[in-house]
Amino acid sequence: MDIIAGGVTAAKGFQAAATAAGIKYQDRADMAMIYSKAPAVAAGTFTSNVVKAAPVKWDQRIIEEEASVQAVVVNAGIANACTGAEGMEYCKRTAEAVEKAMHIPAGQVLVASTGVIGVQLPIDKVAAGVETMALGLSGTISNGHEAACAIMTTDTKPKEVAVAFEVGGKMVTVGGMCKGSGMIHPNMCTMLGFVTTDLAISKELLQEALQEDVKDTYNMVSVDGDTSTNDTVLLLANGMAGNPELTQKDENYQKFLEALHYVNTTLSKKIAGDGEGATALFETAVIHADTKKHARALAKAVICSSLTKAAIYGHDANWGRILCALGYSGVEFDPEGIELYFQSNSGKILIYKDGKAADYKEEDATRILSEEEVTVLVDMKMGNAEATAWGCDLTYDYVKINADYRS
């Protein structure tokens, strides 16, 4: 597997476009489109929140009922959530705008929205944006990048990645983009993710691959403990690489899983590291747990702890907060049998062992915690299971951003 340049347009046959539709933002692009030259099989995973936005409901139906899709339309600024029958009608009208402009059946168009809840979309602006983007579609890396920029809300940077690998003598590409900065919590978070591949694969295997991989990627991210109404990850495969279609879980399927996992993990970490107001990516790696389920629960508990997140912001080696979070995770363990470490590009130190503080220097811990990426390593010494979760530090700016988000 090779890491290559690009995002959603890296795979063969995929194009993208962006436009400034003026939906909310007046000084930047706020709509994006992804288009596949060939009909693509599609998979999706969605928010676990009982309150689901209209685009989530629309996409769930399309994924379940339609054999293929060919376009995705995304808007930033307005979530189209808690908008009743009118919100669902606007999903339909967005898809119909694509049908009119590009002669794609409305049933083959997915939609996604992100932004303020409870506000109706200016559908005329959305339809005009679709018409503009239909004329500007291109498979260039720059068009993919512009699309990644257009879907941002409080994000401070676009998020995209692509990889290539060989299947059946054909070069296959997987690329993706996402947005996410706040209202981020495990079990899908306020994030939109779009992954494209030119792999030929059955719809059933594609859905299974995404559903399983989400458990150890996007569902292991938390910024603030709030699970959004709009969370969506879509995976499109158009088969244009020309490989024999994957219908079995063979060696080639495993190659695809590895590539998909790299793309989803990279995007997950980009979301966590760009959390609202964040100054550091905060990772918790749990090793030697007794079960995978327990490893995930332990890792999530630490990265979700507001006190620990605040300590990371202050570069404070307050390991008591970490131990406390592990203790309320719901997992039974012997506190005197585990070890805790801090590590970053500045080094690695043991901070807790045998039920008490290890022999370390505070200045060494502070130096390690002052990096832009910081890891808490938890060695449970109970088995062979492991899991990693990603979050960010908790800063003053997080409150500032969310205190006036609507204004």
Image (tube, rainbow, N blue to C red):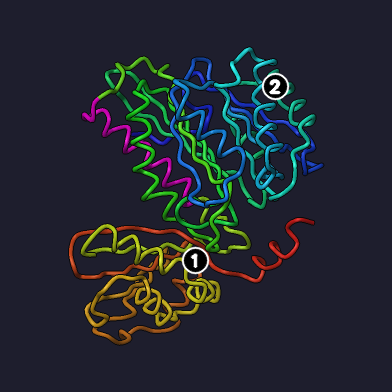
- Asked whether, in this view, residue 402 is left or right of residue 47, the answer is right
Question: Where does the image place residue 25, in percent across and percent down from the top left?
Answer: 78, 43
Q: Which residue is mark 2?
A: 97
Q: Which residues are magenta?
A: 248-269
Quarter occupied by residue 319? bottom left
Q: Nearer the viewer, residue 80 or 5?
A: 80
The three-letter code of the residue at mark 1 reads Glu
Question: Where does the image place residue 230, in percent across and percent down from the top left?
Answer: 58, 46
Q: CA distance from mark 1 to mark 2?
A: 47 Å
Q: Residue at x 58, y 57 (%)?
A: 183
Secondary structure category for the residue under label 1: loop
- As drawn, the residue found furthest toward the left would be 383
- Camera-side mark, 1 or 2: 2
Is 318 above or below relative to 23? below
Question: Where does the image place residue 112, in percent across and percent down from the top left?
Answer: 60, 37
Residue 31 colored in magenta in the image:
no
Residue 298 — which label?
none
> How crowded is the residue under tag 2: few (<14 C-alpha within 10 Å), some, or many (20+)?
many
Quarter occupied by residue 86? top right
The three-letter code of the residue at mark 2 reads Ala
Q: Residue at x 57, y 46 (%)?
A: 52
Q: Which residue is mark 1?
A: 371
Residue 268 colored in magenta in the image:
yes
Chain-order first, disc 1 or disc 2: 2
Secondary structure category for the residue under label 2: helix
The image quadrant where one finds the C terminus is bottom right
- As drawn, the residue found furthest toward the right would be 26
Main secondary-structure element of the magenta-colored stretch: helix
Q: Nearer the viewer, residue 86 or 150?
A: 86
The image quadrant where one finds the N terminus is top left
Question: Where does the image place residue 346, in percent across and percent down from the top left?
Answer: 42, 67
